[in-house]
Image (cartoon, rainbow, N blue to C red):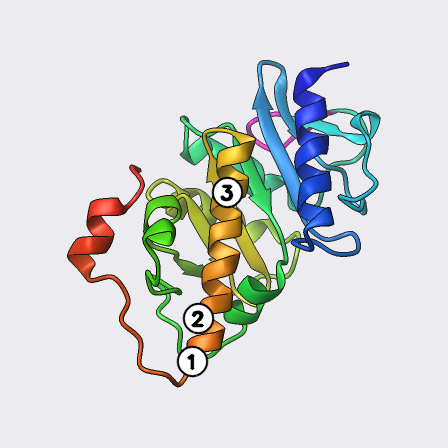
Amino acid sequence: MNEERAAVIRAARSLFDRGLTHGSTGNVSLRTDDGILVTPTGSSLGTVTEDDLSLIDDRGAHLAGPRPSKEAFLHAAVLRARPSARAVVHTHSTHAAAVSCLRDLDHADALPPLTAYFAMRVGRLPLLPYHAPGDDALEGLAEETARTHTALLLRNHGPVVAGASLSAAMDALEELEETAKLFLLLRGLPTRPLTPAEAEALRPAD
């Protein structure tokens, strides 16, 4: 058994089993010595197998296996921008996707640092403008923005999160989703987010 492929499948199952993806939404990637393993197009993270995984290069070109996710170019772009990252997780998780649909968000920082763990694992969360799923016109902006941010929120879509490992990317994705849930629960109530100084002291290194 290839341990890297097995790790991608474990991550996919975990995301699906915990309700962070649904249907055939979401994708997972892992940088390897041979290229980037990524879940294939049209697959459910609840049923995808090791043999189903695609291999792409760092420009998103298909090297081997089934056809990759139509959003594989985003994974390649984020990994190019972040040499220290090995994994990228993208979901349409309910609360983060809901936040991405709200009007009047701060495009430079879509969620306030409501908790210390959000500040530590995510930091600032830029909101990227709407593009249809699979529209590679987003590639350049995603790569540029990912150079200074570990996580991106796609307008009317969902989060894209990078990490030094699959577990780190998934931890950050889950923290983002939980903070989005808190944000929605607290809308209309007076809140006390972390101060800029408190958040900056915890912000992940670029």
Amino acid on which the number 2 mark rests in the picture = Phe
Q: Is residue 72 left or right of residue 154?
A: right
Residue 161 visible here? yes
Query: Which residue appears at 60% of the width and 62% of the height?
Result: 157
Residue at 79 percent of width and 44 percent of height: 46
Image quadrant containing the C terminus = top left
Image position, residue 176 (x, y; %):
47, 55
Residues at discs 2 and 3 in contact (Cβ within 8 Å): no
The segment highlighted magenta reads: 57-63
- Name the residue that disc number 1 marks: 187
State how far apart marks 1 and 3 are (Cα). Answer: 24 Å
Above or below, 22 relative to 184: above
Q: Residue at x 72, y 24 (%)?
A: 6
Q: Residues within 10 Å of mark 3 (few under 14, many from 20)?
A: some
Q: Disc 2 or 3, which lies upstream in sequence? A: 3
Q: Which residue is mark 2?
A: 183
Residue bearing the label numbered 3: 171
Circle 2 crowding by C-alpha within 10 Å: few under 14, some 14–19, many from 20: many
Question: Circle 3 — which element?
Answer: helix
Task: Estimate how packed mark 1 is, as few (under 14), some (14 to 19) or many (20 or more) residues with alpha carbons within 10 Å.
Answer: few
Residue 174 as seen in the image, left or right of residue 38: left
| Mark 1–mark 2 CB contact (< 8 Å) | yes
Say which of 16 and 98 sits in front. Answer: 16
